[in-house]
Amino acid sequence: MLMHIPIWKKLLSWLVPVTIARKSSGKHPALFLKQYQGHLILATPTAYYSYGNVYLPYRKIFKFIENDIPRVQDFLMLGTGLGSALKILQTRYQCFPNADLVEWDEEIIAWSMRTMSLNTRNNVTWIKDDAANFVQQTTHTYDLIALDLFRDTAIPEHFKSKPFYTACKNLLKENGILCINIIPAYKQEENDIQEMLHYTFSSINSLHFAKNVFLICRK
């Protein structure tokens, strides 16, 4: 069942961001679902995790690989949030791949399922799991894998390891693409991650926007 939002909150949200729900979980002490100018936002007190289909990190990443998007039949999202990356594929590119959405917080999954209308073609699966465990256990392969793995704005250490990215590479089909959104805590962190990825992938492109760095890795 989709979430009901009172009409007065919808109207007010065209002027200012409006909180329409709050939750806490063992993984996030405070989560907020907001609406602003027709878009749903998933936020903690210090970070935005999703922003409808205008979520800038994946708008910019997908623009860079837009010539590859028509061939994407199987998509994996690690760190789903509400599902903005998939929503951008569906609404901006009319791309409706079979999608596995992996998210470690069941409360976020519940909001994603109730608010984003992602599964209109019955080909989307939400999976509650840690991304590092999922990539080691699954036998599925994908044309496109997207990583948006944060705790607030920090990247957990086990998502900065060579074994993790080797496992991601092994899940890519021939000509598959891995897209990564990071916010480096310091310049050397970005350099260390890129150096590690160069040992694993045949080519890497980097894009910069504000504090974010987007890495597009090809098998």
Image: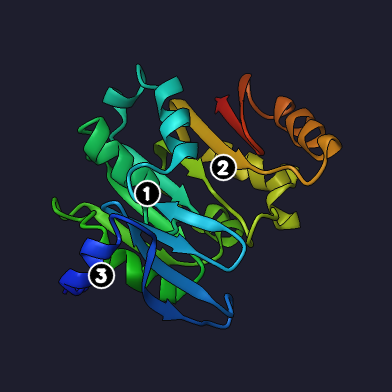
- Quickly name the residue at label 2: 168
Residue 35 position within the rendered picture, expressed as x and y whole percent measured from the top left: 33, 61
Question: Which marked residue is nearer to the observer: mark 1 or mark 2?
Answer: 1
Tell me which amino acid carries mark 2: Cys
How far apart are the alpha carbons under marks 3 and 1? Answer: 21 Å
**Disc 2 residue crowd, few under 14, some 14–19, many 20+, Cα 10 Å:** many
Q: Which callout, 1 or 2, points at the residue further toward the start of the chain?
A: 1
**Disc 1 residue crowd, few under 14, some 14–19, many 20+, Cα 10 Å:** many
Q: Which callout, 3 or 1, points at the residue further toward the start of the chain?
A: 3
107 w.r.t. 102: above or below: below
**Disc 3 residue crowd, few under 14, some 14–19, many 20+, Cα 10 Å:** some
Q: Kindly identify the residue that appears in the image at 27 percent across and 64 percent down.
A: 12
Of 64 and 41, nearer the camera is 41
Q: Kindly identify the residue that appears in the image at 61 percent across and 57 percent down.
A: 132
Q: Which mark is residue 84?
A: 1
- Quickly name the residue at label 3: 9
75 w.r.t. 101: above or below: above
Q: State yes or no: discs 3 and 1 in contact (Cβ < 8 Å).
A: no
Q: Kindly indicate the quadrant of the structure image that contains residue 3.
A: bottom left
110 w.r.t. 47: above or below: below
Of 16 and 54, nearer the camera is 16
Q: Kindly identify the residue that appears in the image at 68 percent across and 51 percent down.
A: 159
Answer whether residue 2 is visible to the viewer in this image: no
Tell me which amino acid carries mark 1: Ser
- SS at badge 2: helix
How far apart are the alpha carbons under marks 2 and 3? Answer: 41 Å
Residue 174 position within the rendered picture, expressed as x and y whole percent measured from the top left: 44, 25
